[in-house]
Image (tube, rainbow, N blue to C red):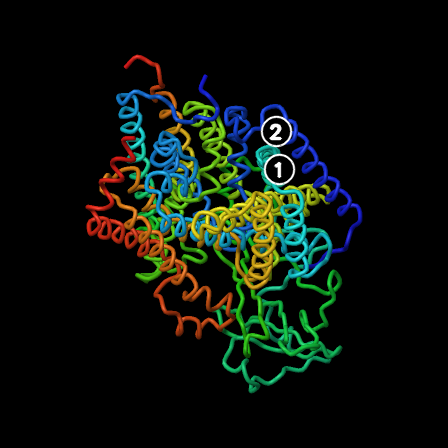
Amino acid sequence: MHFPFSYLTLAIFLSFVGFVLGISFWMGAKAKSSRGFFAAGGNIPWFVNGIAFAGDYLSAASFLGICGLIATTGYDGFLYSIGFLAGWVVALFVVAEPLKRLGRFTFADALDNRFNSRGIKLAAAVSTLVVSIFYLIPQMVGAGSLIHPLLNWEHWQGVTAVGAVVVLIVASAGMVSTTWVQFIKGGLLVLLCTILTVMILMRGLTTKTAEGAHAFRAKVPAAEITGAAGTTVIPDDETGWKGLPYVRLKGADDVVAVWRKSGPKDHEGDLLSETQVVYAPQAKGATKLINGRPFVLGVNDIFPVGTISHLPDGKDSTGPLNPLAFFDVLGRSEVVLWKSEAIAGAETTVYYQVPTLGADVLRPGGGMFAGLRKDEWKAKVNFLSLMLALFLGTASLPHILIRYYTVKDQASARKSTIVGIAAIGFFYILTLYMGLGAMASGSLDPTDPNMTAPLLARGFNNFLFAVISAVAFTTVLGTVSGLIMAASGAVAHDICTNVLKIEMTDGRQVRIAKLSAVVVGIIAILLGIAFKDMNPGFLVGWAFNIAASANLPALVMLLFWRGTTKQGITWSIVVGMVTSLGWVLASTDALEKVYHFTKAEAAMYAWVPFSQPAIVTVPLSFLVLVVVSLMTQRTGTAKALAAARA
Amino acid sequence: MHDHENQREDEQPEIVAHNTRLGLGLFAVYLALYVGFVVLSTYFPAIMATRPFGGVNLAIIYGFSLIVNALILAIIYLRNCRHAGEKV
């Protein structure tokens, strides 16, 4: 992406991160010394806890990922927002309250205390580990994207730096309780996004190219391009380009430009539109080319995209719009989206303009759920499966449920959940404005949509950019340290102490926890690099699939069915986790974006018909629980009933 | 005020039953709204494109209303839950 490096921006960023972390730790330490606030669960006011709910939930993935998804695909990205919020209803009305009534704090605790079974502990610990790691990946991917425009570092450098800092925090100092971090961060995030949305609405929509931005040419008569002085057309007979709707031209300066045949119908050659080309050779030492010229970070890089090509009534600018008029006007406009095509062994990627009616952007099926508008049963089932996973996933995330128990009683817990739902819901409404605002204002890096929100802020001014980046970065640090802590706790406490029954002194247990924090941190860094091309919002969707498949059936049946046995729970967790994880890793999306097969190869080799497993694996996990429980009725139930009545 | 070590609350069975029924009832209401949205998106995308009023299409109106309704139902829940010690 095209960025002049700015010390001012960096300074604002660093001081802001320092300030937020400083205040949070100071408040945290104060709260801790006055009562020790984890044990004294009643000390956190319900309002603070509610905003902290939002802080916990609105991870970097929510913020960066959803804005990026909406900016590239329109309404399809917003479907994630809706699902993420709807999940709170399940958590509040069905799971949290009975769980709190049992006097248990977490998934593992609840299962453990009723049955006291090593099998359950192991299964619950492994499932916590897997869900945590899957939740970590998008945070790391988001971190890499954030660091890139600030320091002009490559993605992998950013991921490694964030991982190292977090591991250092966790391994040296341990975890200062995160409630205040999450409170400040959650509050700031919602506030800043509100400001950003107001600015988007005040600016309105325009077809003019922003100052300093590259104006892409579209639908230019072919003769004008090919006939320019010193230009020669490169013949199509080379491998990879044959039969594709592109015209390649060598200019007077020997730079190759690629134009896409666009019209009157797509693929017709009498009109041409400008593209952007990234050539990333796999051979070591070979030069990466952007638009035909050698890539130089911050100097020759891909141009940001996303513009409005027509406004209604032939206007070129609307002026300030109210929140409803924004959708009305956009719905009657034409926007230019960008799609990509991999060419010749995937070393070359062409990004090309796709003029799209605003009305098509504002309803489901414009982007990754395009199959919804055709009659593709697989696409429809895939969509249903995702919406199911998002609905059930929230109630199955261990680190979210814990927060329900940090206030003094049920009434406060309910109040803080409502504050949380209000803040999160309001934020998700804002995501639609921010994503669409970015789509319409040239704030989109086609190679990395994760940067959409910071770039959008940058379109207004550098201060806002630095502050938004800082808040997002603090988000990453907070979420990542919490998750690494949870994962290392699962290893040290649950697996080593409770399952393997290794006798350990406190000191040794802490050392093992720190060691596993380092290991989990390294795993997270490696996966963060491997999953670079994937959208964090999409990855969080996968984490929800796994959480819902592994944890939800056990949780719900434990609370509502007396016949549940410990074997039933263990097998349900194991089967739910293994099948959903395996499904995700064998899907077309994983093959294409993680193992880097081409689209056609990925579709051919994928073992599963669609990429979201929940619609199959959640019922399967329920079924396993019921069948195994019925088979083990005699041994399990008597104990369970005795335990429940004790 | 409860002891901080003990998060278990002494609620009468009637209160628990009342709150559980209330929770499941509201959950059923929301589930119906959510299923309606998902089914419309999946099988009737054309209906989602209609613009019932103000030029805003049904997809956005329904989507926003799912978010707002989660909050409204949560507030109804809060208002109607019974607490420990309350007369039944």
Chain bearing tag 2 is: A
Q: Secondary structure at mark 1?
A: loop
User: Where A384 falls versus A100 (above or below)?
Assistant: below
Q: Quadrant of residue A234?
A: bottom right
- Disc 1 residue crowd, few under 14, some 14–19, many 20+, Cα 10 Å: some
Say which quadrant the N terminus of chain A sits in.
Answer: bottom right
Instruction: Choose between A385 and A303: the one closer to the eye.
Output: A385
Instruction: State the mark number for residue A32.
Output: 2
Q: Are marks 1 and 2 in contact (CB under 8 Å)?
A: yes
User: Where B55 falls versus A147 (above or below)?
Assistant: above
- Disc 2 residue crowd, few under 14, some 14–19, many 20+, Cα 10 Å: some
- First along the sequence among labels 1 and 2: 2
Residue named by callout 1: A176
Q: Position of residue A87 (x, y in %)?
A: 40, 41
Q: Position of residue A354 (x, y in %)?
A: 52, 62
Residue A320 appears in the rendering = no
Chain bearing tag 1 is: A
Residue found at x 49% / y 30%: A406
Is A562 on the left-hand or right-hand side of B37?
left
Residue type highlighted by circle 1: Val
Q: Position of residue A201 (x, y in %)?
A: 58, 38
Residue type highlighted by circle 2: Lys
